Amino acid sequence: MWSAIQSLLSRVFWLAGKPNPVPSRRGASPEEIPSGGDVAIVGLVIDEQDRRLLAALGGRNHWSITFAESFEAAQAVSTEARACAILCDRDVAGREWWEAVENLSSSRHRPCVLLVSRVVDDYLWNEVVRRGGYDVLSKPLREEEVARAIKLAWAYWNSAARRQTHSAAAQAGSLNVK
């Protein structure tokens, strides 16, 4: 739920041209993304220009971006690399976009799925979030928008992963108490 609210607020402030006053909740700020390729991202995008933009952004931000040619490949790479974000092109053949978003976002490590679409409106954004996705990016991709969305997705994903770790540790501790 927080990801939907955070994404909505960041989008509103971005559209208004104002800085976002809503910080990431109990996690690292988007500027604190670790370097050294620690941030794994999967790109299931078909447009060559979008791929070049993502590759360039990855190099500048020390993100490890892996491009997939199919939904199945994206799912496998995401699981293996524990990707924090998956950019999923709405026009990828073989599956409806909503089915891809639902399946990719339900992976065990809960990546943030960002749908890439030529059509971007409130209805689509609401539908993406309802199906477990994180955000919608417009095609062709724009550098500032992609960088902002991935940094926010990483901050959210990292915060959620920390909560899961703390919760699992607390459960393990309570099982050991007699």
Image (cartoon, rainbow, N blue to C red):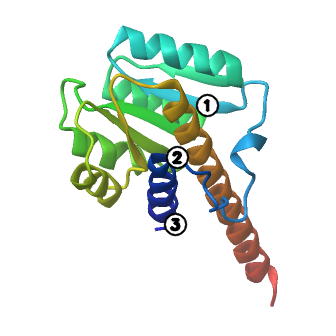
Label 2 sits on a secondary structure element that is loop
Query: Compared to 30, does 166 lie above or below?
Result: below
Q: Which mark is residue 2?
A: 3
Query: Compared to 3, does 119 lie above or below?
Result: above
Q: Nearer the viewer, mark 2 or mark 1?
A: 2
Residue at 75% x, 75% y is 170
Q: Measured from the top left, where is residue 13 in percent x and y?
A: 51, 54
Q: Measured from the top left, where is residue 5 in percent x and y?
A: 47, 65
Q: Residue flagged by tag 3: what amino acid is it?
A: Trp
Q: Quadrant of the C terminus?
A: bottom right
Residue at 62% x, 59% y is 160
Spot the residue most to the bottom.
178
Mark 3: few/some/many CA within 10 Å (<14, 14-19, 20+)? few
> Rounded to the nearest whole Å, what is the CA distance between mark 2 and mark 1?
29 Å
Residue at 34% x, 28% y is 72
> Rounded to the nearest whole Å, what is the CA distance between mark 3 and mark 2?
22 Å
Residue that badge 2 annotates? 17
Q: Measured from the top left, where is residue 52 in percent x and y?
A: 48, 10
Residue that badge 1 annotates? 40
Q: Residue flagged by tag 1: what amino acid is it?
A: Ala
Q: Nearer the viewer, mark 3 or mark 1?
A: 3
* Residue 109 as seen in the image, left or right of residue 63: left
* Residue 91 as seen in the image, left or right of residue 67: left
Label 1 sits on a secondary structure element that is strand
Which of disc 1 and disc 3 is earlier in sequence?
3
